[in-house]
Image (cartoon, rainbow, N blue to C red):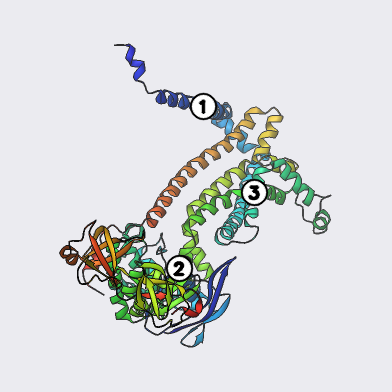
Amino acid sequence: MSIHIRDISKTFGSFKALDGVSLDVPDGTLLALLGPSGSGKTTLLRIIAGLEFPDAGTIEENGADITERHARSREVGFVFQHYALFRHMSVFENIAFGLRVRKVPRAEVQARVEELLGLVRLEGLGGRKPSQLSGGQRQRVALARALAIRPKILLLDEPFGALDAKVRVELRQWLRRLHDEIGMTSVFVTHDQEEAFELADEVVVMNHGQIEQQGTPDAVFDKPATPFVMDFLGNVNVYHGRVENGRAFWHGIPIDYPDYPHAQARDARVYLRPHELEIAPAGTAASRPGTSLPARVLRVTRSGAISRVACRPHGSDAELHVDVPVDTARDLLLQPGVQVSITPRTPRVFIPGPEYVI
Amino acid sequence: MPTSRTATIDPSKAVSALLVAAAVAIVGLLIVVPLMSVFYEAFSGGVAGWWRAVAHDPDTRHAIWLSLTVAPVAVAINTVFGVAAAWLVARFRFPGRSLLISFFDVPFAVSPVVAGLALVLIFGRQGLLGPTLAWLHWKVIFAWPGLVLATTFVTLPLVVRELIPVMESIGPDEEMAAVSLGASGWQVFWQITLPNIRWALLHGIVLANARAMGEFGAVYVVSGHIAGATDTMPLRVEKLFQEYRQPASMAVASVLAGLALVTLVVKFVIEHRLEAEARELELARSTDGTTHDATLEAAGP
């Protein structure tokens, strides 16, 4: 089922949680609402579920206006951040709840709950109380309970937020496979960009109650539409430079920037991710004045197969972060104190002022 | 070496021993001994004498009966009000909310006698609603409805005060989950809200009942103390005492004290359950992701 959201606004007291948000979720998509806390992503999710009502705007499901429809009759499965399992009921009764209030015959309830227990890999745990389960198991009970009523849309609020790293990754991959199998339109909220990018077909980045960018993970990561998206996706070197005559200047190094052909210089911010910088020992062919930046290595830390190198450009107190494969770092003998030169590869430039934001 | 013996005693231990002794002495002197002496006096004529005093005096019998009917009605009103008010305050934010919460405490702050007088001023013959009630032939003051009103007034905060913190700590998520699964308002209340607050509610009810049974001041003012008509148990105790019928007075008092002891036991059991529930809530909230999910490893969906 497709969802069409038009110009939704919602205010809590004096706080504008959503400000004219429009969003299309195509049928069968797994979409991530990504943003910092207070960006309005959870409010938007709750409005889709009918747990909140917008001050303005409309929501359509398959072309039918459901803006005023009560949560009870929306046929939406909602998984809460802290699961919100019914504490006094067994796992079985939790999953059966939506069927029982729909007066589904007893035998059918039994069969459906058994089927779901199998789907979420909790066979034989139907008699347990939620407090007797691990975090990941509770999460899957919450999911089974939401799926029991055969919803047309599945909504998940920070589905992995309360789990530790290992369980989180396992559940994430499992949820992706589950989605591919069921093929239901699903929307989940997260503040974790890695989670959004790994899991979703489509990522929506939100900030201050507005959508900053919507697109596939590749599109959002490779072509961030705004400085906020660039910043939020994390791990980025920012330099406050300038643009003029079709060139941007990064630590004095000119970089082609044909989007700004004007002669008048303007302030600009140049963004480079750590893997978009090349590092070479000083004095080699790669280090040419004017195209590369001389610097000194401050620290080298290891993160999995990547070495994170922190450098300080000469005559500056800025810190640049460069990611290189561990082997490269070893070959180049990178260690604190070593002189290197750094070459920018694919920078993104943002000029303050709305007319120049690319 | 005898000198070092006293020096090794931890001074904080001596202080705590002293405090414990003081507490025991105060509790003994103010609570246990007086209570025991009530029972001692009540049974000074033997069990037969006690039974005669309690069961054979028609006015005393009526007083016990009256207390046993007024208190449950007042508690029932309190329960309905308490649940509704706690739900309103715990689930919604509205202007004047904190003012409303303070108003729930007014019956605790106001002397019960003042409460009784206020009821007389409104429902009495010369009161605000007096003419209307006279025209309807409804007798409130010096009658059963007045006793219920006064008792309800003084016990009003007990249930709602008990429920607000519990409902706030549980939060609205379970209720919203039930709604999104298709439950109606009543289904949510009976199947989710009520089971979650049941022990706190029972605790409030027990406290309200104990207070309702023992209420004296407010009831004294509105009852007109008509023996065999509007005298509740505490009023009966006082009247017998004033009539120099001490053994009979103590016998009725021992019934009240006995009810209080039963309340204490029930309260103890319920508090035990409440603590267990609070621990369970804590456990359910804990980010217990440390256990590796072996169930996931089996295969994909």
Chain containing the residue with disc 2: B
Is label 2 or label 3 in front? 2
| Residue A258 sits in quarter | bottom left
Residue at numbered disc 2: B177
Foreground residue among A158 and A313: A313
Where in the figure is residue A310, as x and y percent of width and height? 29, 60
Q: Quadrant of the N terminus of chain A?
A: bottom left
Q: CA distance from mark 3 to mark 1?
A: 32 Å
Q: Amino acid at mark 1?
A: Gly
Q: CA distance from mark 2 to mark 3?
A: 39 Å
Q: What residue is drawn where x is 46% and y is 47%?
A: B270
Q: Amino acid at mark 3?
A: Val
- Residue neighbourhood size for the residue with mark 1, other residues' Cα within 10 Å, grouped as few (<14), some (14–19), many (≥20): few
Q: Amino acid at mark 2?
A: Ala
Which mark is first along the chain, 3 or 2? 3
Foreground residue among A98 and B14: B14
Residue at numbered disc 3: B70
Give the SS element for disc 3: helix
Residue at numbered disc 1: B28
Q: Quadrant of the C terminus of chain A?
A: bottom left
Q: Is residue A208 left or right of residue A300?
A: right
Whether A34 is drawn above or below B105: the answer is below
Foreground residue among A275 and B92: A275
Q: Are marks 2 and 1 on the same chain?
A: yes
Give the SS element for disc 1: helix
Q: Is residue B301 left or right of residue A217?
A: left
Q: What residue is drawn where x is 19% and y is 69%?
A: A284
Which mark is first along the chain, 1 or 3? 1
